[in-house]
Amino acid sequence: MAGAEGISELAMSLAWHRGLLPGPFLTTDGKRVEIVHRGVWSHGFGPDFTDAMILFDGRDLRTGAVEMHLNGRGWNEHGHQRDPRYSSVILHVVLDGADVSARTLDGAILPTVALPPDAIARLPEVGIGPESWTRFGGEACAPELAASNPARLRDAIWSLGDRRLAARAARIEARLTTEPAAEALWSELLDGLGFSANRVPMRALAALVPIGVLDATLAARPAGGRLDLARALLFGAAGYLPFTPSEAALAGFSTRDTSTIEALWQEAGGPWTDLTLSPTAWTRTRARPANHPAARLAVAAAIAAAAQERGGLLACITAPLREGADPARLLVSLAAPPASPGIGADRAGDMVSSSLIPFALAFAEATGDHALSESASRAWEMLPAPASNTITRRALAQVAGNRTLGPLGGRGMQGLIHLDMTLCAARRCFECPIAHRVLAEDAQTS
């Protein structure tokens, strides 16, 4: 629906999303409006933006939705006054403020901002009618472009992988302002070992048995006994002791191993006796033997013990990465049997992409370590692709249908995950680089 001078509601939403309408504004009844957070673009699933934060008259901070129309009549013409989904709207934004009479379902008068001329001048030239977007979100979005120019789609998918990496690195960098780097790395590694089913208890275990405490405790023991002690402290704090025969077998422990581990827990586990995780915290059912938490805890103990022998976890991980070593091979070697059941190349690659490289980039940024940053970036671009999974297969089919795109590597697999979880699931087609490349290609060939 186009308004004055061809402006559309899509252009208004795009400008709001991009921060081109920062305010402050005045409502039609003279209240000052400041945008604290513009919210999340819903792309037509209910109000235009959800979870926005708006400050009225410098003292009344409200959280809710924002709805946009070309004119003040749009609210009633679209039936929002009778729709409970729009009861969360706290601000109505229009181009033409005439005939404003917006009320929510409960009869409350809705504050309305009519955009001033200087704000209207900042609205982007979308250049694409809303009808162009109806082609996306169906069975496949870009099969023709996949056939004619797959390199353009690979670039788009890699850029999405980079977005996912940047978001993870930013989250870790924020943690580095409040906790030691080694603890953040330990937490990320255990998170990676937990898969989706056991990430929460793995992170809780990392907090319960900090790597600094574990390192110091292991250092006080002869080298030959450190692995068993690491096993005792992690399995004991995790609530797994005494072992059941089946879980000892899943961890790869012999009868002698279990006796040693349980005795060491009785000897050294005093600080954690009343703090252990509940056995029910762990998801143990319907897991392949290699993915069972007992097997993963054995891997964590092996990594901790091996890292202690190599100068501590932080140095053990960052020094080889800085020198250009393959981080996935490093993880596989640290957890190699007989110290633990080990981890495969795919799981190691997943941990590298989701934990090690984001951590390395965050740590490099926090410390000004340019060599580490460059090495981590190179490792990111060279990551081999892991085996596909339900998410990556679904995302690839959504992009290309039955066409092939060529090698995407681990970076591309992360891009497909980001595409599926962040854009496709939420139907955020207006923000999708795949859709934009398709429309750009159409414009060049028309």
Image: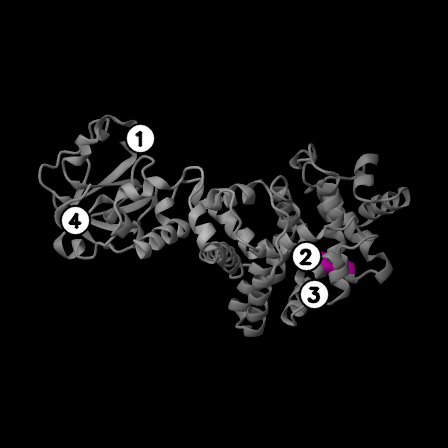
Residue 85 marker: 1
Callout 4: 10 Å neighbours few (<14), some, many (20+)? few
Camera-nearest label, 4 or 2: 4
Q: Position of residue 97 (x, y in %)?
A: 11, 42
Three-letter amino acid code at the position of disc 4: Gly
Which SS type dominates the magenta stretch? helix
Q: Position of residue 4 (x, y in %)?
A: 12, 47
The answer to whether residue 325 is seen in the rendering is yes
Camera-nearest label, 2 or 3: 3
Q: Position of residue 234 (x, y in %)?
A: 73, 48
Q: Which mark sits nearer the N-terminus, 4 or 1?
A: 4
Three-letter amino acid code at the position of disc 1: Arg
Front residue of 150 and 382:
150
Callout 2: 10 Å neighbours few (<14), some, many (20+)? many
Q: Which mark sits nearer the N-terminus, 2 or 3?
A: 2
Q: Which mark sits nearer the N-terminus, 2 or 1?
A: 1
- 3D distance between C-alphas at marks 2 and 1: 47 Å
Which SS class for mark 1? helix
Which contiguous range is marked in magenta? 213-218
**In magenta segment, residue 214:** yes
Quadrant of the image occupied by residue 425: top left
Q: Which mark sits nearer the N-terminus, 3 or 4?
A: 4
Which SS class for mark 4? helix
According to the picture, the residue beneath numbered tag 3 turns out to be 316
Residue 211 marker: 2
Q: Position of residue 318 (x, y in %)?
A: 64, 66
Residue at the image point whose x is 54% and y is 61% from the top:
176
Q: Which mark sits nearer the N-terminus, 3 or 1?
A: 1
The reply to whether discs 2 and 3 touch (Cβ–Cβ < 8 Å) is: no
- 3D distance between C-alphas at marks 4 and 2: 60 Å
For this view, does 354 lie left or right of residue 66?
right
Q: Which mark sits nearer the N-terminus, 4 or 2?
A: 4
